[in-house]
Amino acid sequence: MQIKINTQLIDWAIERSAKSVDDLMHKFPNLENWQNQTKSPTLKQLENFAKATFTPIGMLFLQEPPNEVLPINDFRTFTNNEQKKPSVNLLDVIYASQQRQEWYQNYVRQQDIGTVSIVGKYTTSDNPEVVAQEIVAYFDFHHNFKNWQTALSTRSTLIEEKGILVMSSGIVSGNTHRELDLTEFRGFALSDKYAPVIFINAKDTIAARNFTLMHELAHIAIAENGVSNTNAYNKNSNDTEKWCDKVAAEILVPRAQFKQKYSHNLSNLDKNLDQFARHFKVSTLVILGRIYSLGYFEEESFWVLFHAEKNRLLEIIAQQPKKKGGGDYYNSKPTSVSKLFMKTITGSALEGQTLYREAMRLLSVKKIKVFNNLTEQAHPWST
């Protein structure tokens, strides 16, 4: 049985998937016929087309293409202040995170665990340095880390111990063919007093991810949902983003501590940037911003140096060989969905409170053997 649909929806689905017509033609030889209405797809063909273009099947039965917008605030800034239309990958990773958040929120309320006290405790009218110092005390952050990865994982663990889900992935729902675009976003925050969520784009450098984690934590502290593409400093950012940047910078590189250690000498600037970036486990851009905040640069000079350093880092990243393979699945999976979420939902399934198929759906796991292995990893005592 053939299904008549608006051909504009076929074009829309292709465009939002970011796949070429030529690529899709290999799987759907009649695609052009569907587009020019000389043929219509069968229901099975339409279902397969929806899957191939990452489109909910119901959307293909609409009268006209929908105007998809971000379900949370858009704090991103781009060239000439243009707002970029969200990709299907960004939308899907937000939707998946919201579904996990909803499940965890219900769990927390049912178990009477209580709320996360840091959520909404502050406003952007508060002094960012004072807020940063109080956040450091609340989470018991410190600065003695042997490397950037240890800094990120330790801080993530401390944040999760307070009930905030921290997710970090470079792909959508475990699909290695759907990589997240770093130029589109670096992270987002889903604020909720019971189940706040921080998501970090793992395509970023480890140093940048440390900053994004703190930036999104600042969003949680003011109970502000939103997606960001901040890279430490952006003169076109709105006031909320600038405030969150200041909080993040103070957490990672405390002004008083930095001022005590830093001896300004322009001839040794490159050496200083690298030295302090290694010490505080941040990017050289954050250190450059800290030097500027101490009043050692005029604004115009700072932005010239900032963009030069940013371009230098981008060149280094571009020259690095692309990593092959997906790494250790059982190590990366808990991080991608939040270690806290993984442990909680698998434990709930073990206790019979959550159906296995529901837990597997929320974890984006298709095989029961994989789910059992993840459960055993999260709960060694269960075997």
Image (cartoon, rainbow, N blue to C red):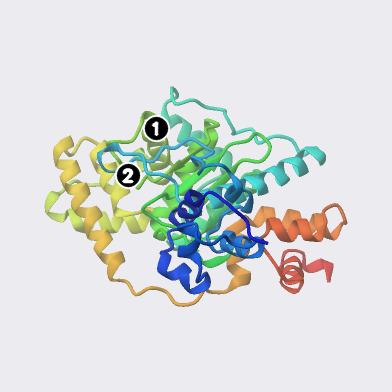
Instruction: Indicate the quadrant where residue 342 lies.
Output: bottom right
Q: Which mark is residue 177?
A: none
Q: Which residue sits at x=36%, y=53%?
A: 183
Instruction: Quote the CA–CA distance across marks 2 and 1.
Output: 19 Å
Residue closer to the observer: 47 or 174: 47
Residue underneath mark 2: 258
Vertical order, 263 against 20 (above or below): above
Vertical order, 284 against 110 (above or below): below
Determine crowd level at label 1: few under 14, some 14-19, many 20+ residues with C-alpha closer than 10 A. Answer: many
Give the position of the N terminus as an image quadrant: bottom right
Instruction: Indicate the quadrant where residue 2 lies.
Output: bottom right
Label 1 secondary element = helix
- The single residue placed furthest to the front in the displayed view is 38
Residue 344 position in % (x across, y down): 74, 53
Q: Which tag, 2 or 1, sits closer to the chain's start?
A: 1
Instruction: Indicate the quadrant where residue 318 lies.
Output: bottom left
Residue closer to the observer: 88 or 95: 88
Q: Amino acid at mark 1?
A: Trp
Residue 165 seen by the camera: no
Residue 104 position in % (x across, y down): 71, 45
The residue mark sitting in front, 2 or 1, is 1
Residue 47 position in % (x across, y down): 63, 61
Residue underneath mark 1: 243
Q: Amino acid at mark 2?
A: Phe
- For residue 106, side relative to residue 38 (left or right): right
- The single residue placed furthest to the bottom in the displayed view is 324
Please count the marks in the image.
2
- For residue 355, side relative to residue 43 (left or right): right
Label 2 secondary element = helix
Give the position of the C terminus as an image quadrant: bottom right
Residue 295 position in % (x across, y down): 21, 35
